[in-house]
Image (cartoon, coloured by chain):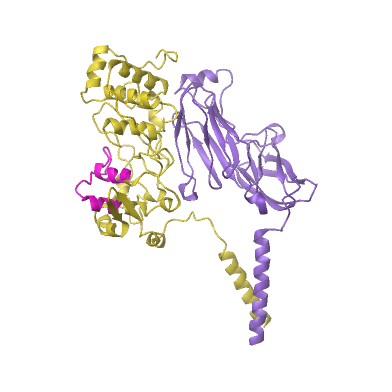
Chain colours: A yellow, B purple
Amino acid sequence: MGTQLRNWSLLLVAAAVCALPLPSLAQLTQLDLQSRIGTESHIGNITGHAKDAAAPYRRYCVGCHGPLGDGEGENAAWMDPPLLPKPRNFQLGIFKCRSTPTGTLPTDDDLFDSIARGFDRSSMPQWSTFTKQERADLVAWVKHFSPRWTNEKPGAPITIPPEPEVTPERIKAGRDVFARVQCWKCHGVLGQANGPSAATLTDDLGRPIAAYNFTEGSRPKCGDTDRDIYRIFMTGLDGTPMPSFADNIKPDEAWDLVFYLRTLMKQNSKEKQMARQLGLKPVDPNAPAGQQ
Amino acid sequence: MRNRCNSAVVLSAIVLVCCGALILGENVSAAGEGKISGTVKLDGTAPHMRGIDMSKDPYCVKAHATDPAHMENVVVGQGGGLENVVLYLSEGLTGSALTEVPSQVPVFDQKNCVYTPHVLAMDINQKFKVTTSDQTTHNIHPNPNPMTGNIPWNQSQPPGAAPVEKSWKATEMIPVQCNIHPWMHGWFVVVKGPYATTDASGSYTINNVPPGSYTVTAWQEDLGTQTQKVTVAAGAAGSANFTFKAK
């Protein structure tokens, strides 16, 4: 009987220890995913359902993003950053293209736009061939990989004032912003992604990553409208070295910077012509602050 | 048989209660503060801290013209004292000590292209400030594991930028970096309850410790963690000295 009792008590101690809450840092399991299969997305008046995206995800996305959404699909091994970025790990819930402040979740619309837009200079094509309903379902499916959407709400989108008329003065002012906040440290004075810090850039997972080269004619990762460019530097691209400048560039100055960045881009534009007429010189990183 | 079952139930109840007491710690009053103090030392030869090449940024080079910068992973002072070790109570906190949040706002400064201090300890939800004293742009980029509930963010701080004020939700040792100056590396050490960081001589004092029995954990970024059991009686200070072996 003594032995029996000891066995019982050992078992109970073991049970008590097992029941202690352990930090949930373990890898995501199919069970966690099943518990979040009810995840929804809301795009305008369309409601997306994660469960309806299981089949298209398996067909179109799983090869890169993997069955558990960790970005370790079988094609991922063939992608070598920085030339070809690795697929996103959805489990972390960290996204580059957001309308929301750094450190916050993107909105459903942000993810919806990313799926449709795709990412230049990566393996992610545009998925504009999907219907809006299918895309909304995929947004819900992407969200169900991360516990962040259970615990947090998306950030409030930043306010973008209406775009002012571009003027030579604004382009010159934009150049001053470019000099003051030192965009050139990574992007280079001509926007050729060859600034002094460009070569050592890594993403949050320690993988090499390239700064955007304005002069190649490729599209910025998170869109190429003026509003997209405004949003990129005011929210930052989370998971990458690109920080948010929201605290250090005023909304009006931000438009000036957008206009100046247009002058660095390969594509011809009103801004580029104005800069040419002005004889605008690139920023001089060796000049004293305020005279660059 | 029935008797055996009954004893088993009684015994299991006792075991569970004991477990409970162990888990929750002794029921101590939060009133009457004590302290735990001691020193942390390195046993062996201090590892070589290599110099930092800051030639990417002439501003940083100039700032260190007379005082060359070195890595700060293991900083050893007089008598082998280890600087930048964080000490906290990993077990034994009860009652209000588990929920109190200090009102002090610790500051993490970017100065001469290094982080000062190199390691900043703080409590969960305690506000802290990131400032810049430099005339060059930094980006302050903590990189926690989002699975803990701490979410990474990344903000620029050009010359003259206002401080960034933040807090963290969960205990974690969070590496901080500047992508523009890749040698800049530091830590936000988020703990629960009273904590201290060792000074240049390796000494520390954890204040505001209610009487009770605790496990004190000492954390060093390269040398890992060590623990000791310490009892703090009402009106008496506890003490714990730690020695890390050089790698």
Residue B111 quadrant: top right
Give the camera-side residue of A20 and B222. Answer: A20
Give the camera-side residue of A164 and A79. Answer: A164
The vertical placement of A216 against B4, above or below, is above
Q: What percent of the width, then of the height, locates residue B189? A: 57, 42
Which part of the image, by quadrant, shows the N terminus of chain A?
bottom right
Give the camera-side residue of A223 and B79. Answer: A223
Residue displayed at 62% across by 44% down = B101
Q: Is residue B93 visible?
A: no
Magenta stretch containing residue A112, yes or no? yes
Q: What percent of the width, then of the height, locates residue B58? A: 47, 19
Residue A190 quadrant: top left
Which part of the image, by quadrant, shows the C terminus of chain A?
top left
Q: Is residue B155 visible?
A: yes
Residue displayed at 44% across by 35% down = B154
- Report the side of A63 relative to A209 (left or right): left
Residue displayed at 21% across by 23% down = A269
Magenta stretch containing residue B87, yes or no? no
Q: What percent of the width, then of the height, locates residue B40? A: 69, 40
Report the number of numbered marks: 0
Q: Give the residues drawn in magenta, as a range.
A: A109-138
The vertical placement of B163 against A44, above or below, is above
